[in-house]
Amino acid sequence: MDATTVGWITAHRPSFRTARDPELPALRPFARRLLPLTGLPLTWYAEPRLADSIHGVRHAMRTAALAALLAETRKLGTEETVTLIVAAAVHDCRREHDQDDRGHGERGARWLLRSAAMVLEHFGLPNNQPERIRQAAVAIRLHEIPYAEFTPVDETDHATARTVSDLLKTADALDRYRLPKLKWWPDDRFVRVVAPDRLKEFAFDLVVRSESAYAAGIGSTESVITALTDRGLV
């Protein structure tokens, strides 16, 4: 993203109604440890040229951070929170382009099932965790499919990983403030878990901070880590 686009986003800051929202919760130590690792190796991307694009490293890292905060607001246990963070980190890594790219969720799910040992090792997690990988794969497959378009098979899969799937969809949607049209920004009608305005405000500020750093010449991973550090999340 260039500085002009960052300036346009900044100028269109929404009016967030945060007066009645509680402060965002602190992340637990395991989540703080995982977030810097969500800057994935380039070799994990189906198209490494997309790593710095709107669906690349910065989007993945911000989505993972937003997922971690959603997990705290919903009081998820450690296992589900870790699964959610991993799913968020890799959910778009098998994209072939930045347009609609229908099927990238399915490709990502299949890749995760094939690459489970490598992914778990990268995040410093125990290797033999088939249920974690299965739930993450379901969430990744479903993240691109609108709820209104779920097939009976989708509904069945969703029922087996409901929490992780719903929170990944919401976290992914919260990072839509990076897109250069207001009609593409977060819309509560399309999610089942609605984020509080304070988290929406955080998501907006995270886009502005990290994309400003990237436009200034800082690398994708470092730009998000810097923004998260400024907010005390890592």
Image (spheres, rainbow, N blue to C red):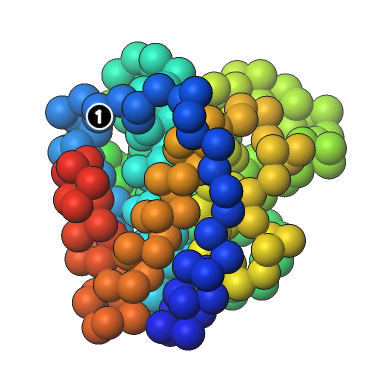
x and y percentages locating residue 72 in the rendered image? 36, 23
Residue in the image at 53% along x and 59% along y: 13
Q: State the SS at label 1.
A: loop
* Nearest to the observer: residue 132 or residue 128: 132
* Nearest to the observer: residue 192 or residue 149: 192
- In the rendered view, would you say 58 is above or below 5? above
x and y percentages locating residue 206 in the rendered image? 37, 55
- For disc 1, the marked residue is 27
Q: Which quadrant, please, contains the C terminus?
A: top left
Q: Which quadrant, please, contains the N terminus?
A: bottom left
Quadrant for residue 192, please give it: top right
- Total residue callouts: 1
Q: Is residue 170 left or right of residue 187?
A: left
- In the rendered view, would you say 140 is above or below 77? below
Q: Amino acid at mark 1?
A: Leu
* Nearest to the observer: residue 78 or residue 199: 199
x and y percentages locating residue 87 in the rendered image? 43, 41
Q: Is residue 148 left or right of residue 222?
A: right
